[in-house]
Image (cartoon, helix red, strand yellow):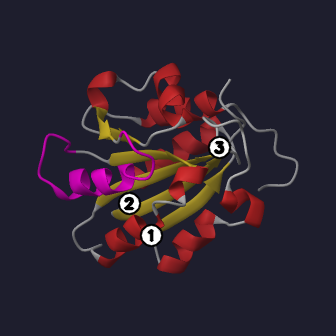
Amino acid sequence: MKEGAKLQRMQEMVAGLVEALSPEDGVCLDLGDNVLAAMIAGVPREQCIGGTGALGGAVSVAIGHAVANDSIKGEVFCVVGDGGFGLHLNSLVTAYMNRHLVKRLTIIVLNDMGWGMTGRQRTTPSALGVDYAAFGRSLGLPMSKNVYSREELREACLEAKKTLGIKLIVAYCAPLK
């Protein structure tokens, strides 16, 4: 994490995504506080393209939308928490292995360094110091970065929409409140 960064609340960060959305974009939400943050931040309901009732499935659902020729003609944004994203790593690698098919997928990891729905225990990645953006760069993703503010998230989302392939944005934030 960036030294001395004053973190914004999760819902404030997600507002950066909302500001970057176009009507043709879709948002897939994984189970967790990120769903509540998305609703508080105002992600348009008609742009929510599903998610899962189980932690760890939204990246796979988002990959399907990013590959399919369905109603989502713009970018597919998948919003997951930092703990849940640890369960998505195999899906990310699978998407990368099929990157010739996945041209418009951006995964946003809301990293508040804790399990929000179960009492704020530290997530394994935060306890071990795992850098998800570095992992994305090691795969060769065309964009894999950390952001620390609503404005940085908005700009990263706008950049992602101009970049083909699978993108990973890790948004460091304070917990949902």
Residue toward you, 52 or 92: 52
Does the magenta portion include 146? no
Mark carried by residue 115: 3
Q: Residues within 10 Å of mark 2 (few under 14, many from 20)?
A: some
Residue type at mark 1 is Pro
Q: Which residues are magenta?
A: 53-73
Mark 2 or mark 3, which is nearer to you?
A: 3
Relative to 36, does residue 147 appear above or below in the rendering? below
- Name which residue lies at 72% across and 57% down: 126
Residue type at mark 2 is Thr
Residue named by callout 1? 142
Secondary structure, mark 1, is loop
Residue named by callout 2? 163
Which mark sits nearer the N-terminus, 2 or 1? 1
Secondary structure, mark 3, is loop
Which mark sits nearer the N-terminus, 3 or 1? 3
Q: Which image quadrant is residue 145 in?
A: bottom right
- Name which residue lies at 32% across and 57% down: 60
Q: Which quarter shows the C terminus? A: top right
* Marks 2 & 1, CB-CB < 8 Å contact: yes
Residue 33 is left or right of residue 66, and the answer is right
Mark carried by residue 6: none
Mark 3 or mark 1, which is nearer to you?
A: 3
User: Residue 140 placed where, x, y %?
Assistant: 47, 78
